[in-house]
Amino acid sequence: MRFMILLKADQHSEAGEMPSEELLTAMGKFNDELIKAGVMVSGEGLHPSSNGARVHFGKDGGVRVVDGPFAETKELLAGFWIWQVQSRQEAIDWVKRVPMPMMGGEAEIEIRQVFEMEDFGDAMTPELREQEERQRAALAG
């Protein structure tokens, strides 16, 4: 099972404040543990929403781009991991070990399972499965 671990933004990450050397060291050590355990697939921090954009697709087919920053900090992300684990509980157990809180005190991390091909049932035809496998191979290669 793969899970996306979503680190929620706060006023400090949205202000572009960089983490301390102490936090970077702790996070690096934690990432080393994840890698050694075979859990971490990928992970990155994100720039503040002031450097981002949102693209809205309307019912009429129109496309509208809205530049950041975005107002609701609690709905924004500051970073993410993709982890390969055996269960949702294992993901929760790893999240409990994340060196937190971030700079501002409180922090929130969301855990979301990533869809696998099997989750789509009969809609994932042999042709679509082959296409998916080809795309994954291209990304890995």
Image (spheres, helix red, strand yellow):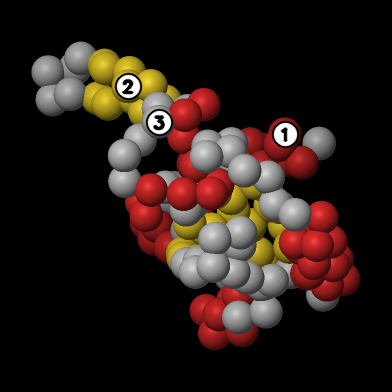
- Residue 41 versus residue 77 in the image, above or below: below
Q: Name the front one of labels 1 and 2.
A: 2
Image-based side of 126 in relation to 39, left or right: left
**Which image quarter: residue 59?**
top left
- The structure residue drawn at horizontal position 47% and vertical position 53%, both measured from the top left corner, is 10
Three-letter code for the amino acid on which mark 2 is drawn: Val
- The structure residue drawn at horizontal position 67% and vertical position 67%, both measured from the top left corner, is 84
Foreground residue, 75 or 11?
11
Picture coordinates of residue 134, whole percent (x, y): 66, 38
Is residue 48 something one can see in this rendering? Answer: yes
Cβ–Cβ under 8 Å for marks 1 and 2? no
Picture coordinates of residue 4, whole percent (x, y): 55, 60
Image-based side of 82 in relation to 4, left or right: right
Foreground residue, 75 or 14?
14
**Which residue is label 1 attached to?**
138
- The C terminus - image quarter: top right
Picture coordinates of residue 123, whole percent (x, y): 36, 51
Q: Secondary structure at mark 3?
A: loop
**Which residue is label 3 attached to?**
69
Three-letter code for the amino acid on which mark 3 is drawn: Pro
- Residue 57 versus residue 137 in the image, above or below: above
Q: Secondary structure at mark 1?
A: helix
Mark 1 neighbour density, 10 Å: few (under 14) some (14–19) many (20 or more): few
Q: CA distance from mark 2 to mark 3?
A: 9 Å
**Which residue is label 2 attached to?**
66
Q: CA distance from mark 1 to mark 2?
A: 32 Å
Three-letter code for the amino acid on which mark 1 is drawn: Ala
